[in-house]
Image (cartoon, helix red, strand yellow):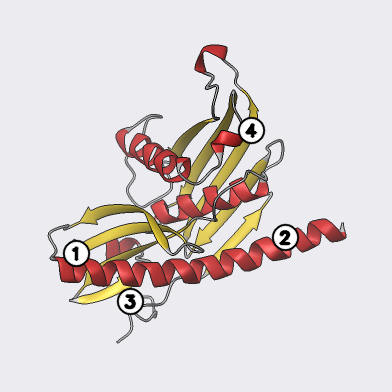
Amino acid sequence: GLRDDGRRATEVRKLKCQLGTVGNHDGSATVHMGLTVVNATVQGPREVSHFQDAKHDRAILRCTVCIAPFSSTERKKRRAGDRRSVGLSTLLQETFSGVVQTHLFNNCEIDITVNVLAADGGYISACINAVSLALVDAGVPMLDVVTSCSVGIIDDTCVVDLNYNEENQGGAEMTVAIMPKYNSILTVKMGGNSRINSKIMKMMLENAKLACNKVYQSMDNLVIEHTSRLLES
């Protein structure tokens, strides 16, 4: 059957992406996954602002996340540096540290800033996808574009790209990020009720990878269109 928002179990929400959305930055991107909206900006690679932070063999990758207080129906006031934002910053930093070719930019820094403007489910995936596109827009060398999607179990059915209501049903869920060209999983973040057996885990990972590849197709088409427009201008 169909889900509450009319999608099939393996159907991702409408994905809209824009590159170069913020001026005065080396790269930027805005991603809409359904009603979830995330903006990411990149500054760098550039010389480190504090010499004592410099790494002689690679660039430093920093990530800061701000979750707007009006982003979801949960009207909890959040301070800069709250636990959820810090945890997501660390997740993004760890995910992209293995993909960005930092060894090409010794004594440099790359600063990534992410703003969650609307969180209607899957905002972690939206953050990963937005950062990936912002890095592409900045021309930062990467092993591959990183794509992400969430997956969960609802009424004993495996569904992808959960919305806010689905995330709050308390079932098992996870966010998965992959490198599509290598078909390799970079990040798995568990959420909800994580007590699942290995068979269900395998099924969830396979469905998540398929969903991530659907996201990649949309993102790849966007990058090609964006590049064509730049070449024509």
Q: Position of residue 36 (x, y in %)?
A: 46, 58
* Residue type marked 4: Pro
Q: Is residue 128 left or right of residue 16?
A: left
- Give the CA distance from mark 2 to mark 1: 38 Å
Q: Could you say which quadrant of the image residue 100 lies in?
A: top right
On residue 186, the disc is none
Would you call the spot at circle 1 few (<14 residues within 10 Å), some (14-19), or many (20 or more)? some
Would you call the spot at circle 3 few (<14 residues within 10 Å), some (14-19), or many (20 or more)? few
Q: Position of residue 33 (x, y in %)?
A: 48, 62
Q: From the image, tell me which residue sits under label 1.
A: 171
Q: Earlier in the sequence, mark 1 or mark 4?
A: 4
Q: Helix or strand or loop: what does disc 2 sit on? A: helix
* Residue type marked 2: His
Q: Earlier in the sequence, mark 2 or mark 3?
A: 3
Q: From the image, tell me which residue sits under label 2.
A: 226
Q: From the image, tell me which residue sits under label 3.
A: 4
Q: From the image, tell me which residue sits under label 4.
A: 45
